[in-house]
Amino acid sequence: MVDDPDALPARPEAHDLSAQGHQAHQADQAHPPHPAHDLSTRLKSYEGHPAAVSATGKDPVNLPMIRHWCEALGDANPAYTGPQAIAPPTMLQAWTMGGLGGPGGPGGRDGHTGRAQAYDELLALLDASGCTSVVATDCEQEYLQPLRPGDEITFDTVIESVSDRKTTKLGTGHFVTTRTDVRVGETLVGTHRFRILKYAPAQARKKTPPRPRPVVNRDNAGFWEGVEQHRLLIQRCTACAALRFPWLPGCAHCGGPDWDTVEASGEGTVYSYVVMHHPPFPAFDPPYAVVLVELAEGVRMISNVVGTPYDKVRIGMPVRLVFQAYDDDLTLPVFRAAEEDAIAAEEAAVSAEEAAVPAEEAAV
């Protein structure tokens, strides 16, 4: 990669030594172009320059390659087999590929003897500007004559266009389009237009993974319907009046299948807790406390205490139910320390009083 874009020659390679050229040079020095505009101008100067001249295919059109292609694509067209076989038209680019070898080795310049320097310079200039990544975006092909096994192809490639700087989801960069004319002897058999995006990768935004969704089934659907209404519902056996949580299809005391519900007051205490350090889970930020809350009604449920650091959670700590929305589709019953709730309520009352004073003064 070239570290200094200015070290690359400008295209076309010419030096204007006339008085007019000298004046233009002085004007450029007095009003230097914006770096982005200067880069775009230099990139566009490569348009029309060759990327390959009289290059030859590494192999003649051949049946083994045709067979591999058809097998890979599941194409059973009989036109591609037998003594009168032709090559699938969409293989046009395959016969121009130089492979991974060549003077530069894998990843370097390919094995075509006709490759022109201008294309390497263009890519190096893009690399030096930070556009180090590449992705093929699309291609267009025109077929003029079928290729047959034994045909030896030659081709010329030209840098057809270099776009202005574009911003995409992948990143910001330039689209480079090349056009390749493929020939057998002097006959033009097809044209392949190929476009790539050379870009500087966009910085990925760190997204918080969604919190796991509860498993809702016919046995607990009523509980989650209550949560949607910001009500914490406890099952009650209609035979023996025993309360049960979590929800079950039958009573563990008398075996009765029938039940109704009682809405919890929301008051409770921390019966037990554990602090989770490992393993980390994408939707959670360890360490955090998982608590077993004993509700005032006598049943216990697992949840979280929000608004209190994990190392401040204590057994016997009074808590109160709150419903916390984690996204548009998920609200969960969690708990807040009762004293935190009291402090928040007191602060809200003070704020309300302070807001009322200006209103009273305005009225006076």
Image (cartoon, rainbow, N blue to C red):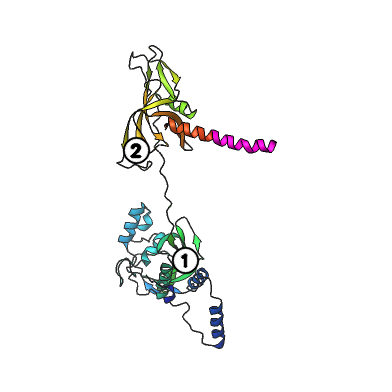
Please count the marks in the image.
2
Amino acid residing under circle 2: Asp
Residue at 44% over, 33% down: 340
**Residue 311, placed above or below residue 104:** above
Q: What stretch is highlighted in magenta?
A: 349-364
Residue 134, visible in the rendered structure: yes
Q: Position of residue 290 (x, y in %)?
A: 35, 34
Q: Position of residue 266 (x, y in %)?
A: 44, 25
For label 1, the SS is strand
Q: Which of 181 and 314 is in front in this view?
A: 314
Circle 2 residues within 10 Å: few <14, some 14–19, many ≥20: few
**Corner quadrant of residue 247:** top left
Which disc number belongs to residue 311?
Answer: 2
Residue at 48% over, 69% down: 160
Give the distance between the C-alpha atoms of the residues marked 2 and 1, in whole angstroms.
60 Å
**Residue 73, placed above or below residue 173:** above
Amino acid residing under circle 1: Thr
